[in-house]
Amino acid sequence: DAEITQSPRHKITETGRQVTLACHQTWNHNNMFWYRQDLGHGLRLIHYSYGVQDTNKGEVSDGYSVSRSNTEDLPLTLESAASSQTSVYFCASSDHSDNEQFFGPGTRLTVL
Amino acid sequence: AQTVTQSQPEMSVQEAETVTLSCTYDTSESDYYLFWYKQPPSRQMILVIRQEAYKQQNATENRFSVNFQKAAKSFSLKISDSQLGDAAMYFCAYRGSGNQFYFGTGTSLTVIP
């Protein structure tokens, strides 16, 4: 069965370190998205991609970057982790014809 | 950007009773999609129900139904015969002409045995 996975599921890091969160989908979807979930804010869009080599900034993109070298993967990089980036991160994917986003299980990131 | 508002941070319902979760949105588009997602303690986001704006008929999925009022830009979720497994965070979401989704801040539903 097709799926979307994220790794690691939990990560603790220190302020200033570079961190990369992986997202891999086997749906063969063109569209991929990264969100962060914080209490009182719901899900906020960080970056998104509509295809290979395409990346776009979302609502809260500062301090984050993504790259899309193939259809299946959209890794999210925190260039220099800050305590304000402690959050739960979700990856999602969809196709142009879909009216649904499929979500990964989430990654809980703690920045100390 | 479109905004989605869920004005009820927390709701509770007795088991077997009915509860309605509210959602309003702001948009200038005429063609769009609305969704309710459920997030149980496992954190997995699960699609509950979706509504196409061009359809006048309210969507229904078993015990879950919506009251879609396009002119009022309102999209509420009704859960009938509530079960303990319905306890979760519920998110309302909007998708317009692009592929981006806009989410509300969520409503935490407690089901009381």
Image (spheres, coloured by chain):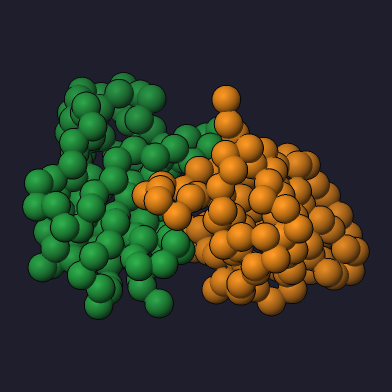
Chain colours: A orange, B green
Q: Tell me, yes or no, if residue A40 can be seen here.
A: no
Q: Position of residue A17 (x, y in %)?
A: 90, 64
Residue at image location 25% in from the left, 73% down from the top: B29
Q: Is residue A112 left or right of residue B105?
A: right
Q: Position of residue B47 (x, y in %)?
A: 39, 40
Q: Position of residue A81 (x, y in %)?
A: 82, 66
Q: Tell me, yes or no, if residue B47 can be seen here.
A: yes
Q: Report the front residue among B109 and A24.
A: A24
* Res B42 quadrant in image: top right
Residue at image location 75% in from the left, 42% down from the top: A7
Residue at image location 14% in from the left, 63% down from the top: B70
Q: Report the front residue among B18 and A93.
A: A93
Q: Report the front residue among B38 and A4.
A: A4
Is B12 rendered above or below residue A30? Answer: above
* Number of marks: 0
Q: Is residue B4 left or right of residue A112?
A: left
Q: Quadrant of the C terminus of chain B?
A: top left
Q: Is residue A109 left or right of residue B51?
A: right
* Res B75 quadrant in image: bottom left
Q: Position of residue A56 (x, y in %)?
A: 61, 72
* Res B1 quadrant in image: bottom left
Residue at image location 57% in from the left, 71% down from the top: A58
Q: Is residue B83 left or right of residue A27?
A: left
